[in-house]
Image (cartoon, rainbow, N blue to C red):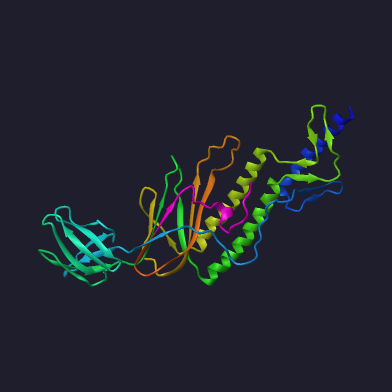
């Protein structure tokens, strides 16, 4: 009967220890009689070193443009894309892009070609009834998100210039996030309890002094950390960000009139969960990237579930198993 007694004692001890792990940092805890430490390989984040951040690929296009009449009437804006329709529905022209600096206009009614024209502000274009001039628009950032089913909350998007002050704020955020990450890592870790004998019961099951949190406990720990980080990211969007996006369609957004320079994009979306094991809040999707934009450019990002970095990826922390 002694093996069964040892096994029962071990299970009681493990249960007690699990209740303490919610506030344990990696490195273990000591209650005076027994010591529990995470197994080797438990992820740990460091707030030191260069400020490495997640990146997203974006596509750069020449910026949009307007056509102006001598009376300052405006037509457009039009995208500088091949086969873009220029003009009205009754009198359409098709844009033929020769290069980033040169274009032509195709007249489908006469099967004629106008141009070539320089793609720069002030270029005159002589149509049949009037002459219009090109006005190139300031730079803009366009962001689209892939649908995620029926969502009750809209994403929030914002960009901040990467000034020295913002860089200092990001370094402070990394230190705070590292503390949250390491606390969570301790909560998720399989732990080794020192001084507990190895016991094998009559069914062949071995109790070797390791304790692993339950799936529910791990999911709840993740959601607690996620909720805390979400509030901090909301604060970052409110305090540091100078430009917010305007919605231009279903999950389509635009930052208009962006001056040339270096920026960081922060997009947050609290999406609905399908996790039956936890009643914690909905998951937080995070997209993050620094970027550079030049004069009269259009920078396009497409955000999907596959290129979301999550809060642990913002500063490239290690991945959890």
Task: Please name the residue shown 19% across and 61% down the image.
Answer: 105
Residue 154 versus residue 273 in the image, above or below: below
Q: Which residues are magenta?
A: 300-321
Q: Is residue 209 left or right of residue 169?
A: right
**Residue at the farthest right position:** 2
Residue 197 versus residue 23 in the image, above or below: above
**Main secondary structure of the magenta stretch:** loop
Out of 182 and 233, give the one closest to the viewer.
Answer: 182
Residue 57 versus residue 168 in the image, above or below: above
Query: How many numbered circles does the render carry?
Result: 0
Task: Please name the residue shown 63% across and 49% down the image.
Answer: 320
Q: Position of residue 259 (x, y in %)?
A: 39, 69
Residue 296 versus residue 253 in the image, above or below: below
Q: Position of residue 94 (x, y in %)?
A: 20, 57
Task: Please name the residue shown 62% across and 42% down the image.
Answer: 219
Q: Position of residue 92 (x, y in %)?
A: 17, 56
Out of 117 and 69, give the one closest to the viewer.
Answer: 117
Q: Is residue 100 left or right of residue 34?
A: left
Q: Is residue 286 left or right of residue 101?
A: right
Task: Tell me if residue 259 is in the magenta stretch.
Answer: no
Q: Is residue 42 left or right of residue 209?
A: left
Q: Position of residue 101 (x, y in %)?
A: 28, 69
Q: Give the position of the N terminus as an image quadrant.
A: top right
């Amino acid at each position: 009967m002694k093996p069964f007694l040892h096994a029962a004692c071990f299970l009681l001890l493990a249960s007690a220890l699990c209740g303490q792990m919610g506030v344990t940092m990696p490195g273990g805890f000591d209650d005076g009689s027994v010591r529990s430490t995470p197994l080797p390989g438990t992820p740990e984040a460091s707030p030191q070193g260069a400020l490495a951040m997640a990146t997203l690929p974006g596509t750069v296009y020449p910026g949009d443009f307007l056509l102006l009449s001598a009376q300052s009437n405006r037509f457009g804006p039009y995208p500088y894309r091949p086969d873009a329709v220029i003009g009205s529905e009754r009198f359409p022209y098709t844009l033929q892009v020769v290069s980033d600096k040169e274009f032509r206009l195709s007249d489908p009614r006469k099967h004629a070609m106008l141009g070539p024209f320089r793609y720069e502000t002030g270029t005159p274009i002589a149509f049949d009834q009037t002459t219009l001039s090109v006005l190139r628009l300031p730079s803009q950032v366009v962001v689209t998100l892939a649908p995620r089913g029926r969502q009750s909350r809209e994403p929030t998007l914002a960009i901040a210039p990467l000034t020295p002050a913002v860089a200092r704020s990001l370094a402070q955020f990394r230190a705070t996030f590292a503390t949250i990450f390491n606390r969570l890592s301790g909560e998720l870790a399989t732990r080794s309890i020192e001084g507990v004998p190895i016991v094998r019961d009559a069914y062949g099951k071995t109790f070797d002094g390791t304790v692993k949190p339950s799936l529910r406990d791990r999911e709840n720990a993740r959601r607690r950390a996620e909720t805390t980080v979400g509030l901090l990211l909301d604060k970052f969007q409110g305090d540091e960000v100078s430009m917010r996006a305007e919605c231009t369609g279903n999950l389509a957004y635009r930052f208009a009139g962006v001056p040339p320079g270096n920026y960081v994009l922060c997009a947050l979306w609290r999406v609905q969960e399908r996790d039956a094991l936890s009643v914690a809040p909905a998951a937080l999707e995070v997209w993050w990237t620094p970027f550079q934009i030049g004069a009269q450019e259009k920078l396009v990002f497409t955000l999907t579930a596959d290129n979301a970095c999550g809060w642990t990826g913002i500063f490239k922390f290690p991945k959890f198993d």
